[in-house]
Image (spheres, helix red, strand yellow):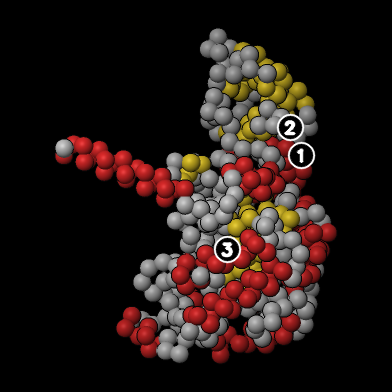
Amino acid sequence: MKKLSICVAMLLSLFLQGKAQEKKIFDETDAQKEARLAWWVNDRFGMFIHWGLYSMPARHEWIRNYERITDSAYQKYFDLYNPDLYNPREWARQAKAAGMKYAVITTKHHEGFCLFDSKFTDYKATNTAAKKDLIKEWVEAFRAEGLKVGFYYSLIDWHHPDYTIDHVHPQRPNDPKDYDRLNKGRDMEKYRAYLKNQLKELMTNYGKIDILWTDFSFPGEHGKDHNDWNSLDLIKMIRKLQPGIIINDRLDLGEYEDGGDFATPEQYKVSEWPTRNGKRVHWETCQTFSGSWGYYRDETSWKDNKQLLVLLIESVSKGGNLLLNVGPTSRGTFDARAQERLKGMGEWMQVNGRAIYGCTEAPAEFKRPDNSLLTYNPTTKRLYVHLLDYPLQRFELPGLKGKVKYAQLLSDGSEIKMHGTDKGDLALDLPVRKPNDEIPVIELVLQ
């Protein structure tokens, strides 16, 4: 009887786990979701843009938090903000030339300043020397270049008077006992209404929006979770207003299978394709050129072109996307370092983009040789070998003897001679001199 009850308990537990995994917000099939995300999965490479008042001090987008700056001390940046060189068409052209297919911009970051013309605050670009809705111009410019458009919107707001002080707020206390005193008179119910109203504006005033990044939840003591944002109502409203939109996973709705469309590993490379409940999920890593997201004048930790290309290739090789960030200056330009990196990536993508767009992780039967990465296009049945360290003439692919019809260097379409080995591998005869590519790519047409 005891064994039977243990078995029943185990079965019940498994059943409840299954039910938990099946808990959904929307009536959408897996096939319908895949169709909604198809363009994003194909495009693989996008631009993130972090821009706001923090571009003026130019020493990190979290400067208010790090330096514990008060509203009154931060006001000078609002009073003097004047992006007189802002030309979003130029931004869009640079994104497109870099090989990016979509872009996401911060409509409001944690500082609370809105780049868009909201009816629910005076803390916005239209009330600065800019005197215009910067988001409206941005959307029009990026659409004109054929890029998909996305909005980032901070759930956090260090400027709003009703947003309660938490452990990441600039005015957080040193003594936890002081939270109640500091939050006296603040009302999160009013802030939730503000949050909802602004997201409704963003979802209705700018036409079709392809992606929404909400950022971010931090549950726990003196933190904020889905209850603080009223996340369930928010995501329902967003999907109702923009049925085709793709939404990230930072609303703290993890109990639902569809509480977010994709995972967002930030500033690190995943070791393997991320999973949830044993099932592979859509994912996108967001990365910076240096260490910060906003413009940081004196930062020296900039990644070189090869590091950035490896980020992109490795993400695709594990079934993911790369959202690469630019932090424009306060005058509205991309600084020289960002332009140089974008140009370098664009030169590589111009001839090697076929190994990125529409590609994903290679099937398990294809073994990755040392010092290389593999991407695979399941539609064209072509395998791409990215040579991180260029070999000396002979290059062997394990177990591929008799499985490849043709091999070529992708950059110029030049044939690579191949022959099988006694071990069942495929040997390629590469040119002695490395092609004029940061990372050369071999395209294999499979049998």
The residue lying at 42 percent from left, 50 percent from top is 20
Q: Would residue 129 appear left or right of 68 to someone viewing this image?
A: right
Front: mark 3 or 1: 3
The tag earlier along the polypeptide, 2 or 3, is: 3
How many labels sit on residues?
Answer: 3
Q: Which residue does the numbered mark 2 point to in the structure image?
A: 410
The amino acid marked with disc number 2 is Leu
Question: How far across and how far down the image is residue 383, in percent?
Answer: 65, 29
Circles 2 and 1 in contact, beta carbons < 8 Å: yes
Q: Quadrant of the C terminus?
A: top right
Q: Is residue 285 visible?
A: no
Q: Which residue does the numbered mark 3 point to in the structure image?
A: 235
Real-space CA distance between mark 2 and mark 3, rounded to the nearest whole angstrom: 42 Å
Q: Which residue does the numbered mark 1 point to in the structure image?
A: 351
The residue lying at 42 percent from left, 86 percent from top is 183
Circles 2 and 3 in contact, beta carbons < 8 Å: no
